[in-house]
Image (spheres, grey):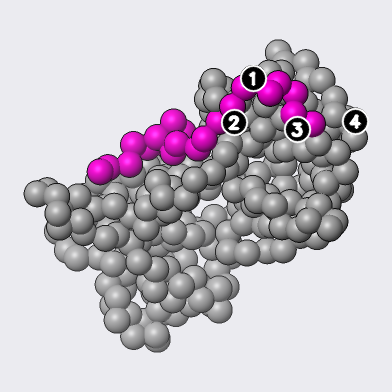
Amino acid sequence: MAQILVLDDVQEAVNAVRRVLEKRGHEVVGYTDEDEAIDHVNNHPVDLAILDIKLKKMDGVQVLSRLKEIRPSIKVIMLTGYPTHATVEEAMRLGANAYCMKPIDRSEIESKVSEVLAQETHIELLRYPDKAEVSTQDILFSSLTNGVYIVTVQDQGQNNGVTTPWVTQLSFDPLMVMVAISPLRKCHEMITNSGQFALNVLASGQVDVASRFALTTGREMDKFEGVVPQRTPAGNPLLSDVFAYVDCELVKTVAVGDHSLFVGEVIGAEVLDSTLSPLIFDPSHYFWEIRP
């Protein structure tokens, strides 16, 4: 069984998680103080940390960052009563494996712990002298070739967009595409409400545009501030100087892992500048530099 650390600013919450997981045979230590929790990980083997986002002296994302510095292979589940908060997105970007809603549900925490502990966290590349640890996600990022797209949507007079490389064609007849978007994103609910979206296919020189729409959240800022978009024939926002656009009508939504798959039927598409080439996804432009 696993060595698990629980950190929450409320002792009752710590006790509740500990009781659930100890019944599953895990060894669990709990803290309400951030420094004590960090010190424990610094001096003891810990397989999994369960961190509340709201703490006393720092937030859970800061603790996550510290724990990853001490023990890069540690797995992390975030606890939050606010699943749409931007700090959840930051936690996932920094290496959190999952999040659970508060108040704590016994079956959910048991399920998430089992799933996360079953995940492979890293692979040692013995051909390198320093045995660099590369996560499975890093391998996927560097091995699967993807373009870069900004999914745009208009809902109730508001424009929004999100950057993603996770787009693929699904069908010839009818023409259908799929895009994966996290429910944490504002675009997720806007696409659900509007029933349509557009893929802006970025050109090779538009990394800065991709970063603008990737590293900010539409819940806290207007991503189109200072930008006057054109419109696709379906009325979706169209960014300047993109390689192409694809208009889609939403036909199906499927929950898969921590993302939703939006399946769209193509109702229009156009290459806007054939002299350009599409931008290819390089994760170091947006997240971190993948080690060799």
55 drawn magenta: no
Crowd class of label 2 (few under 14; some 14 to 19; many from 20; radius 10 Å):
some
Q: Is residue 258 left or right of residue 66?
A: right
Question: Callout 4: 10 Å neighbours few (<14), some, many (20+)?
Answer: few
Give the numbered dot on residue 233: 4
Screen quadrant of the C terminus? top left
Q: What residue type is labelled 2?
A: Pro
Q: Is residue 171 visible?
A: yes
In the rendered structure, which disc, 4 or 2, sits on the residue that comes first in sequence? Answer: 4
Q: Which amino acid does label 1 sit on?
A: Thr
- In this view of the protein, which residue sits in the foreground, 39 or 85? 85
Instruction: Look at the numbered discs 2 and 1 and tell me whether their residues touch, using CB distance below 8 Å.
Output: no
Which mark is first along the chain, 1 or 3?
A: 3
Kindly state the secondary structure of the residue where label 2 is placed.
Answer: loop
Q: Are marks 3 and 1 in contact (CB under 8 Å)?
A: no
Q: Which residue is drawn at 40% across and 86% down?
A: 23
Dot 3 corresponds to which residue? 245
The residue under the point 72% across, 47% down is: 188
Task: Please check the rendered image and state whether residue 271 is part of the magenta-colored stretch, yes or no.
Answer: yes
Which segment is the magenta one? 270-292
Q: Kindly identify which numbered label has been placed on residue 275.
A: 1
Q: Nearer the viewer, mark 2 or mark 1?
A: 1
For marks 2 and 1, give the CA distance: 10 Å
Between 21 and 56, the one lying in front of the other is 21
